Image (tube, rainbow, N blue to C red):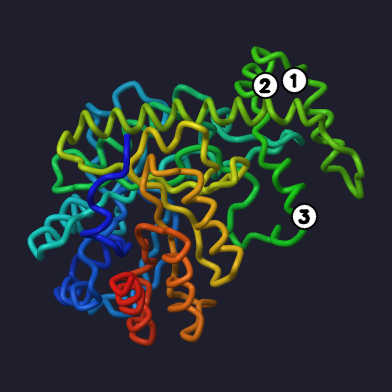
Amino acid sequence: MTASGTTGSVPVVGYAYPWDVIGDPAFAARARDLGVTKVALAAAYHTTRAATPLHPQHRIVEARSAALYRPVRPEAWDGARLVPPTATWVAAEDPYGEAAALLTEAGFEVAAWIVLTHSTLLGEAHPDLAVVNCWDEPYPYALCARHEQVRRYAATLAAEAVRDTPTTTAVLEACGQLGFGHGGHHDKTDGAYDAATEELLSICCCPACREDWVARGLDAEATVAALRAATGAASAETVDPKALDLILESRHAAADELRRRVIAAVREAAPGIAEIALHAQPDPWATGASPGLTPTTADDVDLVVSFCWPTTAASVETGRRLVEAVDGRAAAAAYVTVLPPTTEDAFGDHVRALVDAGIDQIHLYHLGLAGADRQHLLAEATRVRRGA
């Protein structure tokens, strides 16, 4: 699959939640004034506490768990172990559907922003389906893509998100391996381990993953012991590079199967979907909301979106590596934010540098979270991209 023809006509995509749109008659006009023509709207999302500084009816929304922002139809989830809850904190029976209809009527294209394997509620209820590190410590926020029940959940979630809606694009987040980094629940792990240790602690060692390692020729118990030794206190131990290569191969195979199942379900549920976008990083070992690209990722999707929030040279290098990795097989997008610590003096130059690095689209975070003092930065992204 090659890059879609939408990259020139929709250079800047603005992200939002359904509650940003519902109940705010001025939302569409603000987005239009910013130059945004496509809105990536959360259709399935994780727990969050979101500010709504410009909404006329509220200032904070507490999304108490990961949820599907559509009606949860019993017939779609019949027999499934993993079933998402409804979003009772939004005063609408079909939050995504209602918000998408409002945006479409206002002349916007709508992308369904779908977070797939990130649900603490479900991970705590089904710990056998969660990622487990080499110390046998589960990450309940992270559902392991090695499990069939998880793949079924993700595929059904994505299909239900877009069913019977005016959606033109599916934006897939957390479509693969989540790992050590979480960034929630008053996380107290930041900076405790170096990047190499975090990478090792992000390797899933659940029984299903160990079984796959064995099928690829690894001694699973010896490998877990080596990982544990390498992440021990003040350890100088290392893990056999050949074992790490097989572990990455195993992880990528699970990610590929998950992605293809999800994409097939989306296309069956909504044949009119014109574009599949995927949040991913060019680093093949990356985990989290934007997991590492596999060798075949760019052949399956139209657009790859990489996390480039810090206004640093490292983020620009990420954008450049993404362009090289997709190599024309898919379009490349940079995910940027106008929220702190982004500053006015750095943001415009950051977007220009990403465009100069070959980025095709700018994905802009966040139309609902940005207050009045940040609206001009949202507009700056559109001005810079149009100038390019």
Q: Residue at x 26, y 42 (%)?
A: 161
Task: Specify the amino acid type for callout 1.
Answer: Ala
Q: Quadrant of the N terminus?
A: top left
SS assignment at label 2: helix
Q: Position of residue 11 (x, y in %)?
A: 29, 62
Residue contact between numbered discs 2 and 1, judged by CB atoms under 8 Å: yes
Residue 131 or residue 327, whichever sits in front: 327
Label 1, on which residue?
A: 220
Name the residue tied to disc 3: 194
Q: Earlier in the sequence, mark 2 or mark 3?
A: 3
Residue neighbourhood size for the residue with mark 2, other residues' Cα within 10 Å, grouped as few (<14), some (14–19), many (≥20): many
Q: Nearer the viewer, residue 135 or 377?
A: 377
- Point 17% across, 71% down: residue: 28
First in residue order: circle 2 vs circle 1: 2
Where in the figure is residue 364, as x and y percent of width and height?
A: 37, 66
The residue that mark 2 highlights is 210
Residue depth check, mark 2 versus mark 3: number of the one nearer the observer: 3
Element under disc 3: loop
The reply to whether residue 64 is in sight is yes
* Quadrant in the picture for residue 185: bottom right
Residue 295 shown left or right of residue 240 in the figure:
left
Q: Residue at x 38, y 82 (%)?
A: 374
- Residue 48 vs 82, above or below: the answer is below
